């Protein structure tokens, strides 16, 4: 029997990058998957790869900034699986601008995508996680919650706020055996960062900031998520795990 057999994981932003890596890592451990994103074609690819590992995996298209859309997602997932044990809030976005160039609409777009969506997902699925004596919630924060760069005001603000949500929710759910952990990735080799890796000068600049001297591999995030879902990680809650190659230590 695989460690996560009979466990159901809801993973947002699962169509590519870190979300897809975590989905496949949990599938390899036997978890059934509810995969959520807006890109239906890419999401279908993730679902097919997960099913090839021998687990049920369904794709659900949703706008996680919409209360109605999240409510419809909750209904569809529960109708399909009946329960939820793991919730990974991975969906997010960044908009790089000077503070005086932001419109309120843009600011709210970043806030709703990175923070409000997590509130909506937790509000929807936490009730289905209670009463089982086990649960895992991972909120994908960022090293930009700990350090920052110019033109990251919106992104850093939302990720720092997400750490506060993580800590409070961990205390709220501890009596239920549900742990809540932030995962703060540094620079990872994802589709989003391809323009940097393909520019020799920009790539060298980034590598100079990473003490281990390389980009992170998405499989390393997957391995971390799989460990945090294990019984061995049941004492880890209310904290944030930096996985950044030493960026924040430099």
Image (cartoon, helix red, strand yellow):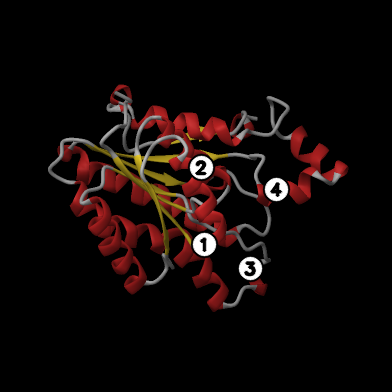
Please tell me which residue is depicted at 33% across the width and 27% down the height of the picture: 230
In-front residue for pair 246/185 = 185
Is tag 2's residue or tag 3's residue first in the polypeptide sequence?
A: 2
From mark 4 to mark 3, how far is it between C-alphas?
Answer: 23 Å
Please tell me which residue is depicted at 50% across the width and 54% down the height of the picture: 44
In-front residue for pair 49/207 = 49
Residue 61 lies left or right of residue 93; in this view the side is: left
User: Would you name the residue on which mark 4 appears?
Assistant: 193
User: Would you name the residue on which mark 2 appears?
Assistant: 49
Vertical order, 41 against 170 (above or below): below
Is tag 1's residue or tag 2's residue first in the polypeptide sequence?
A: 1
Give the label, 2 or 4, closer to the camera. Answer: 2
From mark 2 to mark 4, how far is it between C-alphas?
Answer: 23 Å
Query: At numbered mark 1, what does the secondary structure look like: helix, strand or loop?
Result: helix
User: Would you name the residue on which mark 3 appears?
Assistant: 99
Is tag 3's residue or tag 1's residue first in the polypeptide sequence?
A: 1
Pointer 3 local density, CA inside 10 Å: few below 14, some 14–19, many at least 20: few
Query: At numbered mark 4, what does the secondary structure look like: helix, strand or loop?
Result: helix
User: Would you name the residue on which mark 1 appears?
Assistant: 40
From mark 1 to mark 2, how far is it between C-alphas?
Answer: 14 Å
Corner quadrant of residue 53 = top left
Query: At numbered mark 2, what does the secondary structure look like: helix, strand or loop?
Result: helix
From mark 1 to mark 4, how far is it between C-alphas?
Answer: 21 Å
Give the label, 1 or 4, closer to the camera. Answer: 1
Corner quadrant of residue 123 = bottom left
Is tag 4's residue or tag 3's residue first in the polypeptide sequence?
A: 3
Vertical order, 11 against 155 (above or below): above
């Amino acid at each position: 029997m695989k460690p996560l057999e009979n466990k159901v994981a809801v993973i947002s932003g699962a169509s590519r990058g870190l979300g897809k890596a975590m989905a496949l890592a949990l599938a390899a451990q036997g978890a059934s998957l509810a995969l959520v994103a807006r890109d239906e074609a890419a999401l279908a690819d993730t679902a097919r790869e997960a099913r090839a590992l021998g687990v049920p995996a369904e794709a659900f298209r949703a706008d996680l900034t919409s209360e109605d859309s999240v409510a419809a997602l909750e209904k569809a997932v529960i109708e399909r699986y009946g329960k939820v044990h793991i919730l990974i809030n991975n969906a997010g976005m960044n908009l790089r601008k000077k503070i005086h160039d932001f419109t309120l609409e843009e600011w709210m777009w970043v806030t709703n995508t990175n923070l409000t969506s997590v509130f909506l997902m937790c509000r929807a699925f936490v009730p289905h996680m209670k009463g089982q004596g086990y649960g895992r919630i991972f909120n994908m924060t960022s090293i930009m919650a700990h350090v920052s760069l110019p033109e990251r005001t919106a992104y850093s603000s939302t990720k720092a706020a997400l750490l506060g949500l993580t800590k409070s929710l961990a205390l709220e759910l501890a009596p239920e055996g549900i742990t809540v952990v932030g995962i703060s990735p540094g620079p990872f080799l994802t589709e989003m960062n391809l323009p940097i890796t393909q520019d020799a000068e920009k790539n060298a600049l980034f590598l100079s900031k990473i003490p281990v001297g390389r980009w992170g591999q998405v499989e390393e995030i997957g391995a971390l998520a799989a460990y945090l879902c294990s019984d061995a990680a049941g004492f880890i809650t209310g904290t944030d795990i930096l996985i950044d190659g030493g960026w924040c230590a430099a």
